[in-house]
Amino acid sequence: MIIGIGTDLANIDRIAATLDRFGDRFRNRVFTETEQRKAERRRDVAGTYAKRWAAKEACSKALGTGLRMGIAWKDMSVRNLHTGQPVMEVTGWAKKRLEDLTPPGHEAIIHVTLTDDHPWAQATVLIEARPK
């Protein structure tokens, strides 16, 4: 069963301007080390960050909170499987919220998809509860 869905659209140029203006202060506040390593070795650094920004926003919406109620940016992290497929990992309060949303006898699976077409980056997160 679906227990949450969220989507977000981010402007790549706005993220690029934020990176230029705030640099590491922005990177370290919002993105995990894994996300930063991934973005910094890509040709489209700002686009990579923008997709992850959108994924975090979408995940917070799928959790039913938005970026309120104690969820920190770094409580949600996007990494890629060896196939390139993005996966969302949650920790801290986001993980607690996910556990609270998951019905007894079920496990939560977070699906995430990312795309971009300059100047836009988009992410959709769907949270599924599967019987154990």
Image (tube, rainbow, N blue to C red):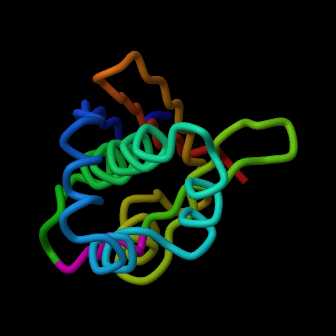
Determine if residue 63 is in view.
yes
Kindly identify the residue that appears in the image at 46 percent across and 58 percent down.
102
- Look at the image and say whether residue 129 sits in the magenta stretch: no
Q: Is residue 93 above or below residue 58?
A: below
Task: Where is residue 98? Give x, y as percent.
Answer: 42, 64
Q: Nearer the viewer, residue 57 or 38?
A: 38
Q: Is residue 127 above or below residue 34?
A: above
Q: Nearer the viewer, residue 12 or 101?
A: 12
Q: Nearer the viewer, residue 39 or 111?
A: 39
User: Outermost residue, top direction?
Assistant: 117
Determine if residue 106 is in view.
no
Kindly identify the residue that appears in the image at 56 percent across and 54 percent down.
39
Task: Where is residue 67? Give x, y as percent.
Answer: 18, 63
The quadrant in which residue 27 appears is bottom left
Quadrant holding the C terminus = bottom right
Kindly identify the residue that appears in the image at 63 percent across and 69 percent down.
34
Left or right of 35: which side holds 75?
left
Task: Where is residue 66? Give x, y as percent.
Answer: 17, 56
- Look at the image and say whether residue 71 sits in the magenta stretch: yes
What is the magenta range? 70-75
Task: Where is residue 100? Give x, y as percent.
Answer: 38, 69
Left or right of 45: which side holds 8?
left
User: Outermost residue, left direction?
Assistant: 68
